[in-house]
Amino acid sequence: MKIKAGDIYYSEMITLFSNLYKMLCTACNYYLFSTEDPFRSIGWQQPELFRILVKKAFEDGYGREKISAMIDLAVLEGVSPEVLPIQQGFILCSELKTSDVKYVAIEEIKKLVDGGEVRLTNVKNGGDRRYFVKEKTNQLCDMLLVISIELAEVEDGIRYYFNHCKENTLEIVLYRALQVADWTSDDDKVWVDIYRYGLTKRIKPRDSLISQYQKRIQKMDPLF
């Protein structure tokens, strides 16, 4: 894209680009294109296009409103086939280059989670709308945990995660959190710390997690 930060059309370009991305996400849930993947219909993969959008949005610097807008785009309902919703969250987190902007992102994520929890009180059980609000909240929690791990503040991140993630059981919350840790860090200690936090909640992990825990402990301490 030839329009750069400082160009008189820069702000308009970001708005139009964001609206295009939103439309393509919406099309993932409805038949607006002749194929099942609207992103591929225009010659792009969703994660690649989202990365370009985020990079362009932050080209002239970070701002609270801009960060919040990108977070909201990262958790839109529409996702291409074979693309995990969390991929967009990881892409956004990777473009938050300093600790200061990471902390701003955490604050904005918490605001969006609070808003989702208010909406849940007004949505009937069992409806599609409730499912989408819960899943959006879960993705926001995923992003917050990613940033917390990157900031080496795992304890704060996992405490928030367990308090706000909307999975059906605490065991599934633990499983999901450990997946996020796997994708975010190669440090076994991060994974083990989250696992042990789950144990403090009296969670009985599934057998596959118990096996992983034992293997990671042996890597960390061969005498275990």
Image: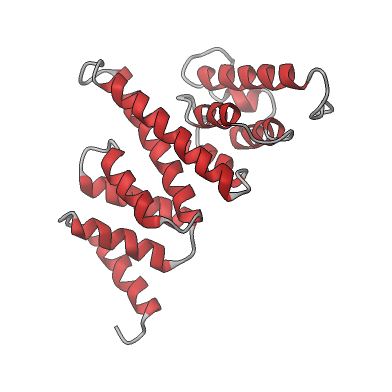
Of 18 and 151, nearer the camera is 151
Residue 164 falls in image quadrant: top left
**Residue 150 can be seen in this image:** yes
Looking at the image, the residue that sits furthest to the top is 32
Q: Where does the image place residue 14, in percent across and percent down from the top left?
A: 69, 22
Residue 130 visible: no
Where is residue 67? Give x, y as percent: 57, 32
Answer left or right for 143 relative to 119: right
Q: Is residue 98 left or right of residue 56?
A: left
Q: How many marks?
A: 0
Location of residue 153 by image quarter: bottom left
Q: In the picture shown, does residue 117 fall above or below 84?
A: above
| In the depicted structure, whether residue 161 falls above or below residue 194 | above
Residue occupying the point 50% across, 55% down:
151
Residue visible at 46% across and 59% down?
152
Q: Locate the C terminus by quadrant.
A: bottom left
Residue at the image position 70 percent from the left and 36 percent from the top: 61
Which quadrant of the rendered structure holds the N terminus?
top right
Residue 192 percent coordinates (x, y): 34, 65
Residue that sits furthest to the bottom in the current view: 223
Looking at the image, is 198 positioned above or below residue 145?
below
25 vs 213, left or right, is right
x then y, percent, for residue 144 = 43, 43
User: Who is closer to the viewer here, 174 or 117?
Assistant: 117
User: Toward the viewer: 141 or 26?
Assistant: 141
Residue nearer the viewer, 120 or 175:
120
